[in-house]
Structure formats: structure tokens, C-alpha cells
Image: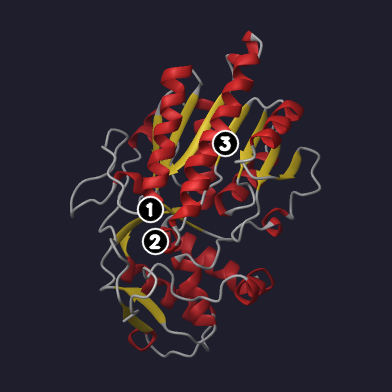
Amino acid sequence: MKVIVTGGAGFIGSAVCRLMTGLKGYEVLNIDKLTYAGDLRTLASISARDNYHFAHQDICNRDAIVKLFDEFQPDAVMHLAAESHVDRSIDGPADFIQTNVVGTFALLDVARAYFDKLPADKRSKFRFHHISTDEVYGSLGSDGLFTEETAYAPTSPYSASKASSDHLVQAWHHTYGLPIVISNCSNNYGPYQFPEKLIPLMSLNLLHGKKLPVYGEGLNTRDWLHVEDHAEALVKILTEGRIGEKYNVGGCNELTNIDVVKRIFDTVQEIVPDISFENFDEAVTYVKDRPGHDWRYAIDPTKMQNELGWKPKYDFETGLRQTIEWYVNNRDWWEPILKNKYAGQRLGSAKGQADA
């Protein structure tokens, strides 16, 4: 199977590329613009494989994407290219609209034209898999879980842009017959994640003797999914999912933010006993909450389990330790990022709101 992966130099996309190129029968073309969060070093282990190819290109560049489709002749598309950080979307929503909405439209437009020209046997096998987020569903109260039937209620510029792209993909299926499948995932974590996200940010702060900034009281709740579990789920959905369906992918690890940060502290302290802080209370600091911070996300993955036989392999304790050990042992990967791209500063404070 020849698969185009958009955003394959990003955190989740690179995990998908590493997985698929190691499986028999797959050939991958990674199309990535290489924005601040794209990093070809995440693909160093597969860059020389005969079944892996890379194109440095923006999905909004329709003519260039048409040429790549015509040359590669894909059997499927896995669309992961997206701006994905809520805090950055608060500070600069325009990039999110451009990539997540306009970019998805451009890719759908190209894929539709390509699909319409395919011979019947290839048309019957073609798939367009759009990878999205649970944040499109909005915020839960203390009870309940997101299912595939949950109504959309996005609250941030990021989640609104992803909800828009989800609706575009569904519209291209219902109006034009493009064979699509959509997946919505919970919070991902694991090796190679850009340091602006919670788990790497807190881990690296501890390694540098810096405080752990927690929004509000730290009681906002998320479900955590290891990126390697997610990559396996995405391949399952692409190859076995039903056309026109949505699949929710969750890690079954629902935790408050303060509990996650406490576990990060304990794990880092076990691995690196000489960190600057003797206890968690000394390390943590509570800062002004993110504007419009959703209270709780939690996914019901029953459909994935029943239809596709997928379950996450990582519990949070095991996955967190593996992740933190990776960051401890791979300074050469993240130190240049902290020096040249992102120094750990507060994002998403609506340009001028005080941090505390």
C-alpha cells in the first residue's frame, strides 16, 4: 500500500511513518512544511529505507500537491498536518485557520480530483484518513465520555479549526463520494514530542532546575494516549475502518493535570535523584489559567475495541517512565530546540495577561 502521510515530521506523524515503514507492504511519502514543530531528526532511523520518501512542501500549495499525487500514485492518504497547540492558537489563530482549514480544503480538493480519475479497482481501495482531536467535542462535566455521536462544541481557536476540518472531510464524503474515515484522539505523549507540551515541558524544567507552572489549580482533566499506541490505532483505522465512519482513540488514562505533574516529578526524581527540588510542593507554582480552559476530556474507545480489536498497550505509569527516560537520554534532540525554537516561555496568555 502506497500511503501519503501529511505532517509526517511532526510528533504523531513521525510515529506513524516509523511504524508503517517497518511493516511489510507499505510505501510512505511524507509531505511536511517543516514548521517550528516539524523535525526530520524524528525520522533519522528510517530516512534511508527504500519504502520511505520525503517531500518538503506546504499542503496549501495545490499545484505542488497535485504533482506529488501524480508522481507517487497513493492508495491512501493519512492527513496529520496541523497546527495543534491550544496556547499558540490563543496567541495567533490565523496560522490555525490557514493550515487546519484552508490546508485541509486544499488537500481534499486534490484528493478528490485524483480519486475521480482512478480506475475502478483502485477507487474501491482508496482511503482518505483524517486525523483529528477529542477537543472538537468541547468540555465534559464531572461525568460522561466522548463517543462518536457526541455533538461538536469547540471552544478554542485550535479546536474550532479542527472541527471545521472534520466537517469539510465529512462533506467531501457525503457530497462527492470521497471514501473517508475520521479519527479523534485524546492527549498524546511519548518520545519526540515538542517541548511546549505538558509532559516534556515539565520534565525538562525539572532537569534545568526550573519551577513547574500549573494552570489554575491543576484540576483540569485529560485522557492520556501514548503516541505508539495511537500510531497502531491509526494504521488499524486506515486499513480496517469502515468508510464514512468516525473512531475515537483514547488511552484510558484519565488524570487531572496536577496529578500528571506530580507523577512527572516523582518519576524524574527516581531517574535523576540530584534535581534541584527536594519535594513536589517546592517545585510546583500555580499560574493564571489559560483563557477558556476546557474542564475535562475523556474518550470512550469502545467502537475501536469492538470493531477493530484495538486496545492501548501502555498504562500511564509505564508510558510516562519510558517517555521521561527518553528525554533524559536524548539531550542532543531537545537541547537545540530549547536554544533555537522554544525556550519554555508561557504561551496562550492572550497577549499580555499576567501569568500569576
Q: Disc 2, disc 1: CB below 8 Å?
A: yes
Q: Is residue 337 visible?
A: yes
Tell me the kind of residue under disc 1: Pro
Quadrant where the C terminus sits is bottom left
Quarter residue 259 falls in = bottom left
Left or right: residue 288 compared with residue 128: left
Residue 154, placed above or below residue 107: below
Residue 210 percent location from the top left of the image:
47, 85
Q: Residue 157 bears which disc, if any?
A: 1
Residue 307, placed above or below residue 268: above
Q: Which residue is mark 3?
A: 78
Q: CA distance from mark 1 to mark 3?
A: 23 Å
First reached walking from the N terminus: tag 2 or tag 1: 2
Q: What scheme was used to colour the molecule?
A: secondary structure
User: Please, what secondary structure does the residue beneath circle 1 have?
Assistant: helix
Left or right: residue 113 compared with residue 85: right
Q: CA distance from mark 2 to mark 3?
A: 27 Å
Q: Which residue is mark 2?
A: 90
Tell me the kind of residue under disc 3: Met
First reached walking from the N terminus: tag 2 or tag 3: 3
Q: Is residue 308 visible?
A: no
